[in-house]
Amino acid sequence: MINETIQALTIAGTDSGGGAGVMADIKTMQARYVFSAAVVVAVTAQNTIGVADFMAMPKQLIDEQFKAVADDLKIRAAKTGMLADVPTVKAVVENIKQYDLGPLTVDPVMIAKGGARLLSEDAIQTVKQELLPLATVLTPNLPEAAELTGMTIQSADDMLVASKQLQVLGAKNVLVKGGHGSSNNESADFVLLEDGNSFWLTSPRVETNRTHGTGDTLSSCITAELAKGQSVEEAIRIGKQYVSATISQGIQVGHGHGPLNHWARVEGENNDNKI
Ligand SMILES: Nc1ncnc2c1ncn2[C@@H]1O[C@H](COP(=O)(O)OP(=O)(O)OP(=O)(O)O)[C@@H](O)[C@H]1O
Ligand SMILES: Cc1ncc(COP(=O)(O)O)c(N)n1
């Protein structure tokens, strides 16, 4: 008998260009030696230059995907990404409540790097009221944290206050990502844990436009590590190390915001015999 392989789930939209969404999530979990299942809630036509079009899946098909996964697989952790619109957010919330999918990481994807809206404006309220309270870990970028809290976030102190507000809204642990920050030399993320402890995670800012799917990669790495049984703090620390490696060890694909290098190795990590 071989041991059961560790399994995790992404609930998100696809990216035909291969760099973000479900595609980035599966590549990340594979790189972290976790088997990835996927509930596709929207299909996008996009590449590194932008999103041309997308369509959300009908509720019945979303329900059937959740059921198919839950009937057969043992999901130890899950994440949400692009959720498109109000009916899709509601369908996802209903299914997450129905099945035991382990700790949930919520990446509240709103607007793609190229500027396309991936969550309708009216759905922000639904995410806030119905999805945030289910989040073990919430990973907003700066514009998303601003949108969810109604704050203007310009300083490190603002990130701290915003993360507290997001906890009040129901997220247990909050990681405010600093990729959209103004510092030229570092990219600093702020973490507020459920027990009130907090810390900064900084990495040198890489001067590059190959940052398509950074948030997806970070949140799916956190999900993979939670599936392995790591603590929330450790999962977040590993997530930051992995996403930094995928940015700094870049690959050349496409003509716009290029995808990350999901083959990247975290320095000092021993990847032998991981399965
Ligand atoms: N140029 C960069 N150099 C180093 N780290 C970066 C850079 N850009 C983003 N990061 C890091 O990548 C992670 C994701 O942050 P970011 O703010 O880009 O998320 P995001 O906007 O949700 O990403 P996306 O929408 O592309 O999925 C964070 O840990 C952030 O610090
Ligand atoms: C399906 C999907 N999910 C998420 C993103 C966000 O990634 P980015 O902000 O890098 O475009 C995306 N572009 N597409």
Image: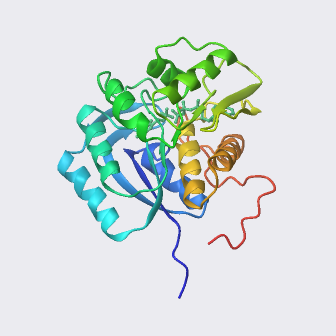
Find residue 225 and report its horizontal and vertical position in percent.
Answer: 60, 55
Q: Residue 202 in the image: x percent, y percent?
A: 74, 32
Does residue 250 appear to the left or right of 153 in the view shown? Answer: right
| Quadrant of the image occupied by residue 87 | top left
Quarter of the view holding residue 32: bottom right
What colouring does the structure picture have? rainbow
Q: Is residue 91 left or right of residue 180?
A: left
Q: Say which of 69 and 137 sits in front.
A: 137
**Residue at 54% over, 57% down:** 29
The picture places residue 97, in percent across and down from the top left corner, at: 33, 49
Q: How many marks?
A: 0
Q: Which residue occupies 51% across, 76% down? A: 4
Considering depth in this image, is 164 or 120 the residue closer to the camera? 164
Q: Is 138 left, or right, of 64 in this rendering?
A: right
| Residue furthest right in the image | 268
Q: Residue at x 45, y 22 (%)?
A: 148
Q: In the rendered view of the protein, which quadrant contains the C terminus?
A: bottom right
Q: Is residue 21 visible?
A: yes
Extreme residue in the front direction: 195
Observer able to see residue 15: no
Left or right: 256, with 66 as reference point: right
Establish if 1 lies above or below 69: below
Instruction: Name the quadrant where ligand 2 sits.
Output: top left
Q: Position of residue 254 (x, y in %)?
A: 52, 39
- In the image as oriented, which residue stretches furthest toward the bottom? 1
Relative depth, front residue between 41 and 233: 233
